[in-house]
Image (cartoon, grey):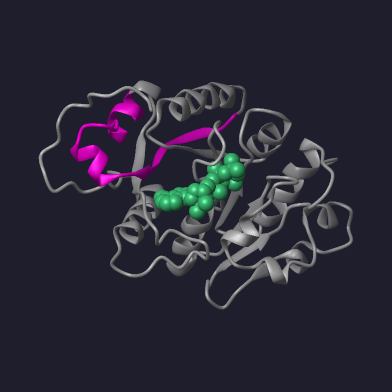
Amino acid sequence: MSRIIVVVSGKGGVGKTTVTANLGVILGGMGYKVTLIDADVGLNNLDLALGLEDRVVYDVFDVIEGRAAPEEALVGSQNFPGVRLLPSVKGSDGIRQTAFQAVADSYALISDFVIIDAPAGVESGFHRAAAAAKEAIIVTTPQLSAVKDADRTRSALGVYDIDIKGLVVNRVRQSALERGEEIRGELIAEFMRVKLLGELPESDYILRNALSPPRSQAREAYIRLAETLLNGGEGYRVKTKRKLFAFKRRDK
Ligand SMILES: Nc1ncnc2c1ncn2[C@@H]1O[C@H](COP(=O)(O)OP(=O)(O)OP(=O)(O)O)[C@@H](O)[C@H]1O
Ligand SMILES: [Mg+2]
């Protein structure tokens, strides 16, 4: 059965689009059929994250209005086997929740995974994306302001019949962990009462184009994230060379 997963955060810029793109590429590489839906209407940049921006012809509105068949609107690349993108609308935002839901359902019929990149905040765009999904991944960074917003988003998901798979803590810095300046993912997840799906390291390799190189911590972390989503189990932790001090500083 196919899975429809929305990637949400609360605070903007914490890595929803990056996580959506990288996770999609990893799952596609494992042999799954993956459709990525850009639900960030107006600020859409999932095409950019995948380096597919020059190939975009149709968008989600064309599918809703029948100008393009669902398959026809998808954009893919040989670099990313198994992964195709449904781009978002560039201009105005008139898409109804029910129409968007129907679009996601139609892609679920032809995919193993539909991953929806939600906009920041808990406004109408967030609700449209959340209503279309069956499962949710919440992304935050270790900063308290992002964690608070992520927790608000977790509450906002409460009105939906949605399985919160857990939390991804992105941009975790090994050096900051070792100095005790950053909160570990476990503590954040415990505070939010959700499962930790994994930490993702701060990394220069992490995408512009979803090509994180082999043997990087970043790639390993994404593979583990995919495995955790597929099979459960422990999420990835950013490795530290030294024993950790207790967390000692408040949000910066
Ligand atoms: N682990 C990471 N290491 C380094 N840079 C990262 C990492 N994750 C994301 N970034 C960078 O952070 C920026 C914001 O990421 P991204 O666009 O994925 O966030 P977002 O949550 O989708 O933002 P928005 O709320 O605007 O949609 C991008 O420039 C991205 O390349
Ligand atoms: Mg984004």
Q: Is residue 50 magenta?
A: no
- Identify the residue at the far left of this view: 243
Q: Nearer the viewer, residue 89 or 233?
A: 89
In the rendered view, tell whether residue 137 sits above or below residue 44: above
Report if residue 53 is visible in the image: yes
Residue pictured at 23% horizontal, 44% vertical: 175
On the image, the x and y values in percent for residue 30 come to 42, 67
Q: Could you say which quadrant of the image residue 144 lies in?
A: top left
Residue 128 lies left or right of residue 4; in this view the side is right
Q: Which residues are magenta?
A: 161-190
Report if residue 111 is visible in the image: no
Q: Could you say which quadrant of the image residue 169 lies in?
A: top left
On the image, the x and y values in percent for residue 164 come to 48, 33
Quadrant assignment for the C terminus: top left
Q: Could you say which quadrant of the image residue 71 lies in?
A: bottom right
On the image, the x and y values in percent for residue 99 come to 80, 43
Residue pictured at 41% horizontal, 65% vertical: 212
Q: Nearer the viewer, residue 231 or 6?
A: 6
On the image, the x and y values in percent for residue 56 come to 74, 66
In the rendered view, tell whether residue 120 sits above or below residue 65: above
Q: Is residue 166 magenta?
A: yes
Residue 251 lies left or right of residue 182; in this view the side is right
